[in-house]
Image: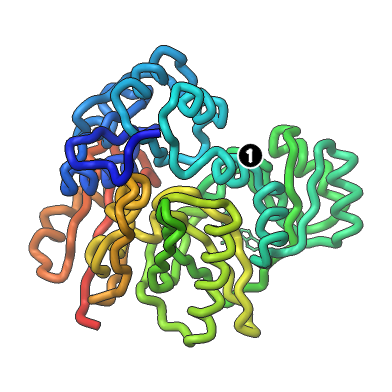
């Protein structure tokens, strides 16, 4: 294990080269670290601001060995990196944070809900099914409507289908590719919130104010933060975050997506073991933002303060919306964050803006 706290001049490895990696690399640079990115694309958003890119798939043994040789600690910006790659890095003597436990829990929606409920972080009722027959039986037992999701590798609303009648569950199972699924009871939420939190190597924790999130076609469109919420709601979210962080012996920043029910109760939808899109507002609204916080945590530095100093509306710039940068650049309240992606496909996250108002 490397000596902690990691001194400036050290190299932090990042698995994944997308925008989250880019913003982590920028924050790391501010603290005097170098970043080495492992990413299949030679021209990635993170790679273009990193000191070094190792161009290879995540499971390339030689590339993992090269990363382990240059980096004193490794983190990831994407939760679907193979658990075997993390174990390989650890076997090579480099520390990976968050650890493989957080990764394996977050990669499987069933393991995730089992962990959450066992930790005292409530979720909707659920069942798992590995075959069309099991899906059919589970849907009859739970009753429709329900939401069927693939256990693994779904994101931004992909890999999920509503089942309106229990009799349709077998067909939905096949339409999702015949892979293991989770069946979820519908959450009758009044709004979606998220809490971003961090845990340091010493077990210290820090929780950001809540964000209120609005999605379109399964993609986050807008976050308002700090969300208008009662102290009781904020306290519930904080308790959930601490249970999750401690339960996973977590190191780094985590994103926890929540449903707020009519009666004020919060349920956890899912956890992301990384910096999170709904935490981008912290860049211009908080004392220390989620990206610096994550770097501080994995480098063994003390966590920074999370208090908000402004109210922020974060808007994702999808596809060609990023081309409005000329207009946006005229707005004094608008902070622009662009990811340097070369091609603007429909729905692709090209950047975001934080519209800042005094608290
Ligand atoms: P996910 O990919 O699990 O984050 O789901 C994407 C979106 O689908 C969420 O942000 C919710 O708007 C909706 N959703 C997910 N799970 C449920 C559920 N059990 N009940 C109602 N809506 C859900």
- Quarter location, residue 258: bottom right
Task: Look at 55% across and 41% down and name the residue there.
Answer: 103
Left or right of 181: which side holds 271? left
Relative to 238, is 217 above or below?
Answer: above
User: What colour-coding does the image apply?
Assistant: rainbow
Task: Give the total of numbered labels.
Answer: 1
Q: Nearer the viewer, residue 88 or 7?
A: 7
Expressed as whole percent of the image width and height from the top left, the position of residue 268 reads 60, 64
Q: Is residue 276 left or right of residue 304?
A: right
Give the image location of residue 75, x and y in percent: 40, 38
Q: Quadrant of the N terminus?
A: top left
Q: Residue furthest front?
A: 3
Q: Position of residue 285 (x, y in %)?
A: 25, 69
Q: For residue 318, say whether it is visible.
A: no
Residue 303 pos. (x, y %): 33, 60
Judged left or right of residue 144, residue 98 is left
> Helix, strand or loop at disc 1?
loop
Q: Residue at x 73, y 43 (%)?
A: 181
Residue 255, compared with residue 208, is above or below; it is: above
Q: Which residue lies under the disc numbered 1?
A: 152
Query: Circle 1: is it few (<14), some (14-19), or many (20+) Cα within 10 Å?
Result: some
Most foreground residue, 291 or 296: 296
Tell me which corner region of the image, top left, top right, bottom left or bottom right, holds residue 101: top right
Taking the spot 42% from the left edge, 59% from the top edge, the residue there is 198
Instruction: Report ligand 1 position as a quadrant.
Output: bottom right
Residue at image position (25%, 33%) is: 11
| Residue 96, above or below 309 | above
Task: Work out which quarter of the rendered image holds the C terminus and state it.
Answer: bottom left
Indicate the quadrant where residue 344 lies.
top left
């Amino acid at each position: 294990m490397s000596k902690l706290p990691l001194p400036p001049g050290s190299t932090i490895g990042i698995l994944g080269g997308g925008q989250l990696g880019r913003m982590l690399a920028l924050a790391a640079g501010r603290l005097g670290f170098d970043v080495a990115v492992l990413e299949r694309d030679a021209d990635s958003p993170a790679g273009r601001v990193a000191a070094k890119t190792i161009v290879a798939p995540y499971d390339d043994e030689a590339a993992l060995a090269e990363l382990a040789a240059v980096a004193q600690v490794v983190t990831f910006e994407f939760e679907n990196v193979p658990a075997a790659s993390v174990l390989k890095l650890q076997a090579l003597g480099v520390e990976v944070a968050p650890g493989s436990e957080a990764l394996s829990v977050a990669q499987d929606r069933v393991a995730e809900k089992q962990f959450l409920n066992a930790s005292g972080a409530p979720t909707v009722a659920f069942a798992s099914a590995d075959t069309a027959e099991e899906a059919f039986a589970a849907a009859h037992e739970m009753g429709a409507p329900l939401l069927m999701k693939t256990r693994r590798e779904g994101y931004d609303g992909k890999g999920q289908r509503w089942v309106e009648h229990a009799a349709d569950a077998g067909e939905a199972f096949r339409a999702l590719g015949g892979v293991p699924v989770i069946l979820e009871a519908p959450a009758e939420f009044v709004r979606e919130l998220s809490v971003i939190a961090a845990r340091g190597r010493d077990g210290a924790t820090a929780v950001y104010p809540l964000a209120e999130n609005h999605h379109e076609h399964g993609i986050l469109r807008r976050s308002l933060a700090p969300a208008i919420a009662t102290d009781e709601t904020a306290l519930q979210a904080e308790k959930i975050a601490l249970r999750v962080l401690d339960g996973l012996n977590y190191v780094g920043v985590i994103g926890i997506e929540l449903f707020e029910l009519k009666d004020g109760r919060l349920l956890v939808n899912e956890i992301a073991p990384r910096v999170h899109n709904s935490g981008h507002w912290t860049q211009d609204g908080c004392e220390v933002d989620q990206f610096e916080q994550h770097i501080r945590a994995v480098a063994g530095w003390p966590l920074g303060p999370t208090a908000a100093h402004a109210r922020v509306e974060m808007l994702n710039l999808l596809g060609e919306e990023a081309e409005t940068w000329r207009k946006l650049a005229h707005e004094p309240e608008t902070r622009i964050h662009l990811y340097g992606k070369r091609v603007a496909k429909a729905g692709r996250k090209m950047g975001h803006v934080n519209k800042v108002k005094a608290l």
